[in-house]
Amino acid sequence: MPSEDRRQNTPAARILIVEDDPEIGRMLAEALGEQGMETDIADGGVEMDRRLMRSTYDAIILDVMLPGESGISICRRLRADSTTPIILLTALGDEVDRVVGLEIGADDYVTKPFSSRELVARIRSLLRRSGYGAASKQRPRTLRFDGWRIDATRRQVHDPSNARISLTTAEFDLLYAFCLNPGRVISREELLAMTHSGLAGPIDRSIDVHISRLRQKIETDPKAPEMLRTVRLGGYTFTATVEAS
Amino acid sequence: MIARFARLRPSTIRGQMILLILVAVVAVVQIGSLLERATRNSGVTITNPDLVTARLGTIALLLRASGPEGEAEILRSAAAAGLDLAIVDKATADALSAPTGLNAAVGRVFSRVFPPDLDMPANSRHVLVDNRLALTADLDPSRALIFRNVPETVLTTDMTSPLIYQLLSVAMLGILFSAFIYFVVTAPLRRIAASLGSVDTFLAGDRPLDEQGSREIVDLSRTLNELRDRIHTLIQGRTRMLRSISHDLRTPMTRLRLRAERISDQGLRQQMLLDLGHIDRMIAAALDYFRTDRHCEPTERADIASMLQTLCSDFCDAGHSVTYEGPGRLIALCQPDGIIRAMANLCDNAVKFGAAAVIRLSGDQRQIVIEVRDDGPGIPPDMHERVLEPFFRIDNARAIDTGTAGYGLGLSIVDEIVRHHDGVLALVNDPRGGLTARIVLPITRPAAT
Ligand SMILES: Nc1ncnc2c1ncn2[C@@H]1O[C@H](COP(=O)(O)OP(=O)(O)OP(=O)(O)O)[C@@H](O)[C@H]1O
Ligand SMILES: [Mg+2]
């Protein structure tokens, strides 16, 4: 069992669940526990603060709709002085909530009702990403290269003529990961860890498929890529100069 | 003073109209009598041409009867009485020209329509002396009598002086009424129409109409304001209701779902998770359909080709067969999320009712054509209109079995988005089977750079 391996190799991830519905909280804790994570439950902002004083956590799962202080306000407060990854649990999965959530500093969001499998996958991906040093607070929201512009909050990409180019979730995650590490050779395993890819659907595409799709959209000649170069036996490297803001 | 006048002014259009008529009548009487006095004071006391003619006849008679001294005496007395008379050679008199121009023409028409009651003296006629109207009559075979300062007939006959009043009142009412209709009725209505604009802008705007003007206009504005408020309340209420239903449902549904995941009987677990998924999608679809902010998305330059490629990849990654045929880049002004949404709905139908789908994109200077072709059963031609209606489905038995049942909202959302882009959605059955949904967007394509 992979969870067993995990427990042996690394200390178990500690997750704080901030959720007012006791049954959801309990079942979430159980589901995460089965995956080898240690959990604590707080039923609101006050209880959360008390727990945060006593120990540290690798990630916080935060319900948006809480009695008393709202999840949005808590999230903003947490972000002011910590980089602990935050996953928001929202009831309304529309675009506005996602943008608001990311703007106030959440790292990801999951719409209710969700499956525990989905939540676990999100947490894993988040832990991996923060493990690779891209701590939430320093993550730039806007990146530029060669006239291209990436808005990480809205997950939008504009080409040098300022036209919006549409990317899949995996393509966007890849491009963002490349922009955070320009000039560095990144292995396929690292790329996989830095993206959500694999969560999208039943079919698990290899990184190469996503890279080739991404080249179609950003390279002048996808057959002779200039920006996204393949490094033999190593992985891929992004050659453009990136400015972050 | 003005404020006091404003307070006294009637508030209804009917009242203002009555006041207007009263003002017009008073003005007509006043101006008419002023005019009358003005024409009387111009030196001529005789205003009736009949009288002038009669006098000329009488004087000519007297002159003929008296001797040369008598003539001088008569002329002097006449001058003293304010009558401007002169005796000239017949040749001189004949040489005088008859009056011409509009006034004379009108005068002739008048004397035709209202002929003088008395016969004119022998060989009398109207002439011009120093550009003024005069009357001449033969005195004897070698001489003629000239009577100057004859009043202009048009304004001064007995018949025409009431006519002044009539003309004046018509003009007065005409002017006053045009002004009234313009300022009190037309202008406010036009202002209302302008600030309403189309139904969309009326509903989108939040600035109420000015409640100003006559009472009818104020009533109209107020009713429209109330109407808009009512519609806003309805829309907001509907959205809020759906949102709170969805929110209140989602907490217990999350619980249900997490609980269902713990069921050890695999068949039962699968069934419950399927049903839960179904309920969740239904709520999401209804909520999405009733969204009011879909049209608020800003228009921007976007690459349609990459949107369709992304869609293709997403559907392929979800295990469907969707291929894209078209250029690698096609930039157009549009509402990108709207277009993505519409195309996703069409692809969703294509893979739901068929097995494989092809998205085809083409465009020229005037329009962009996007087609989604599938290999499903197609839609009977008589249903092409109805499938665009919300909540309409032809036969979902098959889809319900496979757990992919929709709610009949997909195509109505597509239609709405396409219309909002001033485009056209057409459904065409392929003779080889399958349906082609074609979207034509009249987009002025900015030159791709
Ligand atoms: N590609 C197609 N082939 C055959 N029938 C179709 C196709 N697209 C739509 N229809 C018919 O038109 C109906 C209305 O389609 P629409 O997309 O509006 O609703 P839906 O797909 O049933 O539900 P929803 O889109 O809300 O999930 C469908 O129920 C189906 O009967
Ligand atoms: Mg549909």
Image: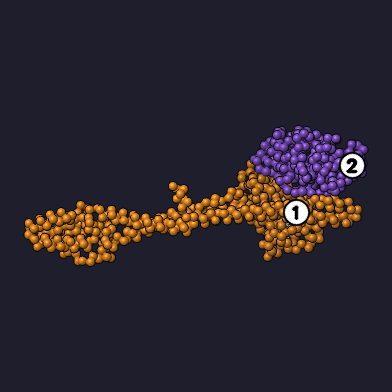
Chain colours: A purple, B orange
**Which type of secondary structure does the marked residue at label 1 adopt?**
helix
Chain of the residue under label 2: A
Residue B367 seen in render:
no
**Which type of secondary structure does the marked residue at label 2 adopt?**
loop
Residue at x 32% of width, y 59% of height: B164
Chain of the residue under label 1: B
Q: Position of residue B329 (x, y in %)?
A: 67, 45
Q: Nearer the viewer, residue B109 or A185?
A: B109
Left or right: where A158 falls relative to B279: left
Residue at x 91% of width, y 39% of height: A7
Where is ligand 2, by quadrant? bottom right
Residue at x 70% of width, y 41% of height: A157
Left or right: where B394 falls relative to B117: right
Instruction: Using the rendered image, report if marks 1 and 2 lie on a common chain.
Output: no
Quadrant for the N terminus of chain A in the image? top right
Residue A182 vs A203, above or below: the answer is above
Residue A149 seen in render:
yes
Q: Nearer the viewer, residue B443 or A30?
A: A30
Q: Which mark is residue A36?
A: 2
Residue B424 vs A196, above or below: the answer is below
Number of numbered tags placed on the structure image = 2
Q: Which residue is mark 1?
A: B245
Residue B252 vs A37, above or below: the answer is below
For residue A80, which quarter of the picture? top right
Camera-nearest label, 1 or 2: 1
Going by the numbered disc 1, the residue's amino acid type is: Ile
Left or right: where B210 falls relative to A170: left
Q: Position of residue A104 (x, y in %)?
A: 73, 39
Going by the numbered disc 2, the residue's amino acid type is: Gly
Q: Position of residue A45 (x, y in %)?
A: 79, 40
For residue B302, which quarter of the picture? top right
